[in-house]
Image: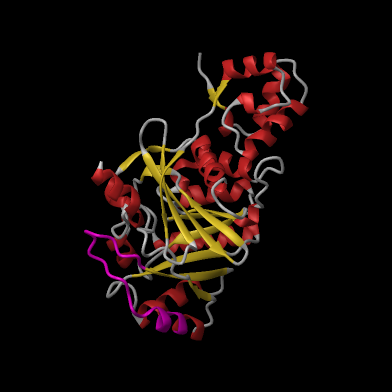
Amino acid sequence: MFMREINGITYEKLEEYMLSIGEKKYRAEQIFRWLGLGVSSFDEMTNLKKEFITELEKEFYFNNVIIEKTQVSSDERTKKFLLRLKDGNTVEAVAMHYKYGYSLCISTQVGCKMQCKFCATGGCGYVRDLTTAEMVSQVVEISKTLPERVSHIVLMGMGEPLDNFENVFNFLKIISHKWHKNISYRALSLSTCGIISEIERLMKEDLPITLSISLHASTQEEREQIMPIAKKNNINDLINMCRKYAKETGRRVYYEYLLLEGINDSLDDANRLSDLIRGSNSAVNIINYNEVKGVKYKKSKKAKTFWQQLKKRGITAHTRRELGSDIDAACGQLRGNSTNSL
């Protein structure tokens, strides 16, 4: 018999199941509240009868991740987690402390197909998609270790979220539910390298999440050099899709721009980027590169001048605060080091 992950089922599907076996709808609420608290077995759900638990155990199982390793930055504001899955694979997540609380960056795949040249994960290859439960469990298990509530979640860890659309979509529905972690859609951010067809699909789902585009270049040629996905997703078509997304959803689109020394950090790049996105509901997040061993790219020293030029051209831009550079905080670094040491 095929069993389902109880911690990866949406509230609507759980409610449907309860009605199908002759139970009341409120059973779904009871179970969902326990899942939000992070229980790892039905026996911990103390307001459920044993006979009911026996029925649930025939249909569902818990698919939890295990925190195998934790690294803490010297300022104690960033924690990176190596998480082991049931099949022995590992992924990463990072918790970052801000004034408003913790922002948690989680993974959506084991490895990644996109092969971005500057990324540690890209060099690991693709193994498989994470299930919905494995994504939910990252949030639940890490939340237990933090002194404050996780208030924001970023899908920007290992993997391309829009390449695992169904599981990511269900994750967003679960983690935002009022009887689960109750994290506002507006506090959920999805970062994609720019799969145009899937951005359009996300737009049609009408979820008020924040969309971030890993742009990292100001021309098609430049982008193809560092991001193979650009060969199938032209930069101008991508920007046009993002303009449409912003207009249809009423949500600002954020362009992530990772500065690489001598590659994309010139004033000409800043000017071309300004021309590319001007007039749209958007902003630029300038990111300082966290150098990866064995990867040729270097951190740029021009973040301030790049930001000043964008500002001069009337573009809303921010320089992302550097966090966790002393604990292998670039995506894939901790997993790669751990794998190499096994």
Residue 22, position in %: x, y?
74, 15
Q: Vertically, is 300 above or below 213?
A: below
In magenta, the rendered stretch is: 289-308
Residue 252 locus on image (x, y percent): 59, 64
Residue 148, percent across and down? 61, 55
Question: What quarter of the picture does the C terminus occupy?
Answer: top left
Of residues 155 and 150, the one drawn nearer to the viewer in this rendering: 150
Taking the spot 47% from the left edge, 47% from the top edge, the residue there is: 162
Magenta-drawn stretch, dominant element (helix, strand or loop):
loop
Q: Is residue 306 above or below residue 128?
A: below
- Is 184 inside the magenta-drawn segment? no
Apparent side of residue 10 relative to residue 303 in the rendered image (left or right): right
Q: Is residue 162 visible?
A: yes
Res 314 → quadrant:
bottom right
Marks counted in the figure total: 0
Between 140 and 317, the one nearer to me in the picture: 140
Say left or right for 95 vs 114.
right
Residue 265 placement (x, y as % from top left):
34, 76
Towards the viewer: 44 or 291: 44
Q: Quadrant of residue 44?
A: top right
Residue reaching furthest to the bottom: 312
Rendered residue at 31%/54% (across/down): 120
| Residue 241 in view | no
Image color mode = secondary structure
Q: Is residue 265 left or right of residue 323?
A: left
Q: Residue at x 49, y 47 (%)?
A: 198
Q: Determine if the magenta segment contains residue 297.
A: yes
